[in-house]
Amino acid sequence: MNQYYSKFYNLEVNPFGETPDPDFYYASLQHSEALLALEMAMRERKGFSLLTGEVGTGKTLLARMLLSSVRSQANTALILYPKLSEIQLLQTICEEFEIPLGFSNETAKSQIDRLNQFLIENMKLGKRAILLIDEAQAMSVESLETIRLLTNLETKTDKLLQIVLIGQPELNETLNLPELRQLKQRISVHAKLQGLDQVETARYVKSRIELVGNGNFVRVDPGAVKLIHALSAGIPRRINQLCEQILQSSEKRKERLITEKSVGEILGIKPKGFPRSLIAVFNKGRNS
């Protein structure tokens, strides 16, 4: 957990940090369903799984939760920056699986051969091998095709390597390209993340504060939550950014109860300044 500086709220750590910290994982319904679906795909040794969602919906954090849940039964690899050439991608995969380096001038084939040998030995030990690729929307068609070919590494009964692609919605557009139809056909599970609804937003904010043990030092009333939800569209990263800004300003104002009025004042927002679409979301929340 990140160090924090608030003496007024007695906060030793930041409850609204932006890094994907598993200690702050909030198991919303959609996150729980997505994690369960991916875990099931791993248990059943499915070749390809897909996790998509808008920026800030918690994909990377969910990936870390998945890694944590399977790590005792599997060798795992996580690639965070996959915009690589074929050779670089294969080399990175080998490095992530801690496969000993080959020659400096290795070909794609020799790297795949090393990976295949590792996967065979890994299966003999009774372990699975799981590769997660984050920000997969940045991958080229050629790199995605290379990844597809890796699922051909198999025995008569099992895939030697399971792959989870994680990316923003535009990844779906790439996978719809005719040249990637074989890859798309191999995707057995497609989990999706969206913004939280208003109820989940309230629970999310409350859980973050309670996780640092300071629910009695700062409270956020329902009106403030409705405004935060309207401004963030329920996107966890945006909720965190807003709440951190609000918390810092509320500390200066010596306010332990954060209200709709105080949030508006802190953010410099007046109802007439809202875009019409945002007013509609906000008023709908107020009247529900």
Image (cartoon, helix red, strand yellow):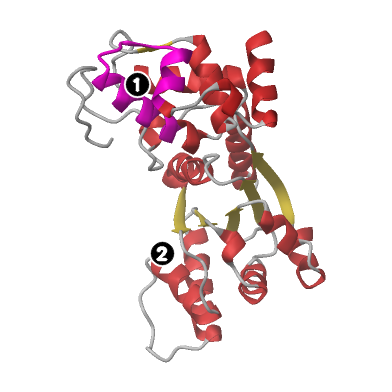
Tell me the SS state at disc 2.
helix
Up-down: is 17 above or below 150?
A: above
User: Quarter of the image containing the C terminus?
Assistant: top right
Query: x, y percentage for residue 133?
Result: 53, 58
Q: Nearer the viewer, residue 93 or 45?
A: 93
Q: Is residue 37 left or right of residue 221?
A: right
Label 1: how many residues lie within 10 Å, few (<14), some (14-19) or many (20+)?
some
Question: What secondary structure is the stretch in magenta mostly built from?
Answer: helix
Q: Would you place residue 250 above or below residue 95 in this image?
A: above
Q: Residue furthest bottom?
A: 105
Q: Toward the viewer: 55 or 136?
A: 55
From which residue to which does the magenta span run? 240-266
- In the image, is residue 57 part of the stretch drawn in magenta? no
Residue at 54%, 78% (x, y): give it: 112
Q: Position of residue 88 (x, y in %)?
A: 47, 78
> Which residue is tagged 2?
96
Residue at the spot x=68%, y=56% of the render? 170
**Looking at the image, can residue 288 be seen?**
no
Q: Kindly identify which numbered label has been placed on residue 211.
A: 1
Q: Residues within 10 Å of mark 2 (few under 14, many from 20)?
A: some
Above or below residue 189? Residue 11 is above
Q: Give x and y (percent) for residue 82.
A: 51, 66
Q: Amino acid at mark 1?
A: Leu
Label 1, label 2: how far apart the Cα atoms are: 32 Å
Give the residue drawn at x 59%, y 57%: 162
Q: Secondary structure at mark 1?
A: helix
Which quadrant of the figure has residue 231?
A: top right
Q: Position of residue 28 (x, y in %)?
A: 56, 26
Q: Residue at x 52, y 42 (%)?
A: 56
Amino acid type at circle 2 is Glu
Residue farthest front in this picture: 272
